[in-house]
Amino acid sequence: MSFPNPATSVKLVLLGEAAVGKSSLVLRFVSNDFQENKEPTIGAAFLTQKCTIGERTIKYEIWDTAGQERFASLAPMYYRNAQAAIVVYDITKPASFIKARHWVKELHEQASKDITIALVGNKYDLVEDDTEEESLRKVSVEEGKGLAEEEGLLFFETSAKTSYNVNDVFIGIGSKIPEAASAGPNQIHQTNNDGRIDLTSDPNNRPRAAGDCAC
Amino acid sequence: MAFFDSLREKAVSTINSVLQDKKTPPGLTKEQWFCREYSLPDGEVVVAENAAEVAVISDFSTSAYKDLNNPEGRIYLTQHFIVFRDAFDRRNCSFTLHVSTVKKVERLPSKSYAVALAIGTQSKLTFTIYLVGLRSDSEKFAQTLKTVLKRNLPNVKKLQPFVQTCYSEYLLFKNNISSEKIESVPPGGLGLLFKFPGNPKELRDKSKMKLWFDLFRVDGRNLSLVKTPMFYRLIRVGLPNRLRGELWELCCGSMYLRLDYQDEYKEILEKNLHKKSLATDEIEKDLNRSLPEYAAYQSPEGIERLRRVLTAYSWKNPEVGYCQAMNIVVAALLIYMSEEQAFWALNLLCDRIVPGYYSKTMYGTLLDQRVFESLVQNTMPMLWDHITKNDIQLSVVSLPWFLSLYLSSMPLVFAFRILDVFFLQGPQTLFQVALAILKINGEELLKTDDDGSFISIIKDYFQVLDQSAHPSSPNPKYRSITKFQELLVTAFKEFAIVDDEMINTHRNKHRDTIFQNISSFVKRTELRNLPKTVNISSDTLSVIYDRFYSVVQSSVTVGSGSSLMDFNAFRTFMSEICRWVKPESDSGPEDTVFLHHLFSNWDTEGQRALSLSDLVSGLNKLVEPDLMTMITNFFDLYDYKNKGKIDREGILQISEDLLYVTNPWKEGYVLDDITKQAIENAVADEVYKANAARESNDGEILIPSQMDIDKPKFEGLQVERYLQAASTFIQRAFEYAQPEEEELLIKDLAIDNTISHNAALNPNTPVFLNLPTFRMVILADETYELLFSKTLRESIQLDTPLDNKINSMRNLRDMFDGLLADGRKVANKVRRRMDSAASNALHSNNNLSVNSSDNTSLKSGKSKIQEEEEERDDDFGVISIDEKDKDLLLGAEAQVLMDPTVDNASRTNELKKFHDAEAAAGKTVHKFEGDNLIEFET
């Protein structure tokens, strides 16, 4: 008898300035879809998606937060106990990169100590075809990488529109999250699951090949 | 009869006092609370009140109605309203009558009452008011009513145009009930153009309309409506589409604002046409994402209205501006309300009904979430235990309910029903419904163990609200009850105890914690946003932050205020941390010149105010530890055009400002290092002499804890030294100032021998001081050099705790005590004197003990000296002059001596004031140096 690996839950929070594409990244990852006019996120939206990395199945519990500046004071409510965070900026908007830097600091100061953070420069589609002289790009790859190295973050440039690199972000985070930690920092949660192994509810949902995200 | 009358009177007054005992929530005055209780605009004040019985009659009143006992209660008169409430049950009868609708007042003859008044209104109602109580009180009330009506006369003209905008009036006119001619359909919601949500048949819209029609005929409407139990019942069953907007604004009171400020909405829009702001940008982003499923918001008409209302509000109240979720709320209001109606309703919503929900910090939202949690904890302890045990973040589920008033969570038809009650009862409605949702789904929720499934249970529940709550019941009546009806019943019956008072109690309990959390979050964020400051540590920044907000009148937590520091706040701020800034109370205008200078220099945006970031950058420059950079920073303050040079005016200004800044030392109440050294040396000399007089072997030097020193002498020396420095500065500054370069060039070419070779000394020739020269002039004076290397920096104590302002008047005694408390320095000096004396005299015994019974009055404080090789610190080692600079100075000195043109004659009056001081200082400086020399001789 072979059961699929029990999925381990990972609480992931998305942070970043308004309109950098947080919800779009999630929508791409969860439904492989893209919408031009998405309703603004009030407070936060909650979505889940499973992702198989090698032998492990990770169930992402995604908290997609509102980006408008004033909602920032609600953020601690959402990143509390998060094991992973994606800090998103728009590579055509320098201000959003500054904001990203602040979010990283905020997380390092206030969130769980061993949180895995990915820095994501979104809207790659806008600069894809640019020539070197004329580019919409305002934040260079080097700047992004620099910040990531400085703060010990994963780094990606993505496009939720074309789906470029989106899954890689979630796979990257999944591979970096230590096996033991992925059960969740709240031990209560873990003990509650004791004795009833989560068979990921769907027996047909066989684990897929490594790196192939279930989306 | 009289007996019963007085009995009744007593009962009424007792009940009234009970009514008035209802607690006024903190933060509100009694007047404000009254306005809120009766949905009046802020600013209404009760000018008269009396116990009263009332009878309301209209042409359509049924006889049954007429036979009812007259309600008894209390009548209040404000500047614009006549308010009545039944003493026993407000819902039995109450009215808020706008005085503009009063057509006539008649005094009726009455035997049983002191005064009886008949008030006829525009809506053809007759209010008969029987005043109960002392005749004199009743007369006074009647008199005040007369005055109020008279004063209100100018407002009466607003009534006609207003009535034209009320659908209720239109309804009555169309049905030939009202003689009030309504020319066209009053402006209303988008529903009139794009259909109202829901099926009107299912909603029984027509029947509801008929019921309201009847009510309006009998009980009046809009500005003169009597609220009877029927009124509340009709709201409970849901409002009809066409009347919904008007009744919302009537219930919450925004109707009165719309009446009072009839043109404001239009004017705001006109005034700000084409203007942009952060808020308008944010609004643009969300216009296409507000109730996009409703047809109107797929059309320009709907989008335009939404844009206008949201932007108008953002201009009206820039402190709130725009918050996501407002788009959804306004989009919903606009389905039933005209733009103007929605605009005023939004105003009242943000100001009064849910304050702080949409503010910059959203403190109201956070607070109410906390309140909701504690209500869940109190009313459903089992569910609460389950939630905490599984670490489910309840507010994550409930926050959007409150913030978007259920409009983004439930199907619209149901959310509007909740809004109907919400506008009548206020925020308690939101809590009652939220609690009911959890209660009804309690069993299911107890089975979940994570946020995800918790959310999805409730999401699913919202989708089946139209289904039967008891589908398997054999009783068809039971079966027909929908889940939504069940929800309302649970909310308003079972959770009726959750009223405003309870909510206020909970809010007060949690307010401080929430505000603290917000403050620390805002602080973290703001500090992180500050520019890098190498000279100010992050701990100090935190103190600066607190001080900044202690002097800037703005509330961080409620997210209001611009958080900019004006000059007065800046001055207060500086006086708390700088020795040289006197508190406002004892300083004149001349004391603010330098501060004004700093202020405008630091004001990078030119907005006549400093942001925290401006302030921190400025302070960072002011406490620069590097001497050369410090001099440069100071120079830059006066280099207005960034040309690297300062003109004559600037030089004079610098010298004035230096005088000002050095005041505490110049006036002798703070001592600088040079003076400290001198005192230490003097003390050491005394102690040495005392010790030398009595030989001792115990190797201990006793430092007296108190000692009489010649205080005036040291103060005097310092004062003279500072005056001398000021005088020298201006003298040298003009000496070495250079004429304008181009001019110099021209003159060189002209080879005009008649012109004095030092053009700088000619007051008519423009001269300039450049940075190297300025630096040289400063470095040439030990006092000013010390000022820039240490004194100035140390006179600014950025980390002074907030409750402990700097004391600029610290006197010499304190300083001296401090010096003795840290006796080691003096002890070392004594030791050195002894050592050198010993070696000089080839004395065999170095170990002396100093006893305290000398010429000084002493309580002994012992200080054991460690034998350590230290460099002598009683020379002025702090001042180390760069070799290059030294050369320069030597050159300069030489020039001063040789240059015959260095003559006071060439200097103008500005210098005159320094002269006397200079002359006086001449001798003492020598004397002072003499003291030093003695030191070197030993």
Image: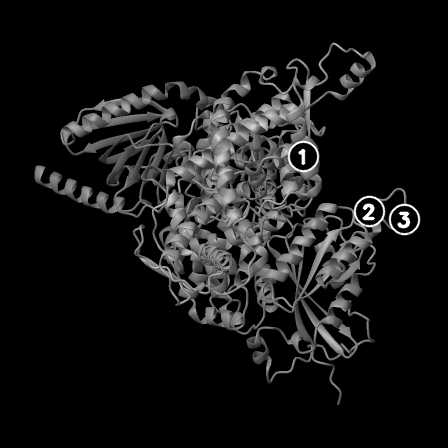
- Residue B780 locus on image (x, y percent): 62, 35
Q: What residue type is labelled 1?
A: Leu
Observer-side mark, 1 or 3, equals: 1
- Residue B6 locus on image (x, y percent): 12, 39
Q: How crowded is mark 1: few (under 14 residues within 10 Å), some or many (20 or more)?
A: few
Hey, which quadrant is residue B148 in on the image?
top left
Asked if disc 2 and disc 1 are in contact, CB closer than 8 Å, the reply is: no
Between B715 and B41, the residue placed more toward the observer is B715
Q: How crowded is mark 3: few (under 14 residues within 10 Å), some or many (20 or more)?
A: few
Label 1: state its secondary structure.
helix
- Residue B294 locus on image (x, y percent): 65, 45
Q: Quadrant of the N terminus of chain B?
A: top left
In the rendered structure, the answer to whether residue A146 lies left or right of residue B271 reads: right
Residue furthest to the front: B842
Asked if disc 1 and disc 3 are in contact, CB closer than 8 Å, the reply is: no
Asked if disc 3 and disc 2 are in contact, CB closer than 8 Å, the reply is: no
**Residue assigned mark 3:** A129
Do marks 1 and 3 both belong to one polypeptide chain? no
**Which badge, 3 or 2, comes first in the chain's sequence?**
3
In the rendered structure, the answer to whether residue B149 lies left or right of residue B139 reads: right
Mark identifier at residue B383: none
> In the image, what residue occupies the spot 51% across and 43% down?
B932
**Residue assigned mark 1:** B890
Mark identifier at residue A137: 2
Q: How crowded is mark 2: few (under 14 residues within 10 Å), some or many (20 or more)?
A: some
Chain letter belonging to callout 1: B
Q: How far apart are marks 2 and 1 (CA)?
A: 58 Å
Q: What residue type is labelled 3?
A: Asp
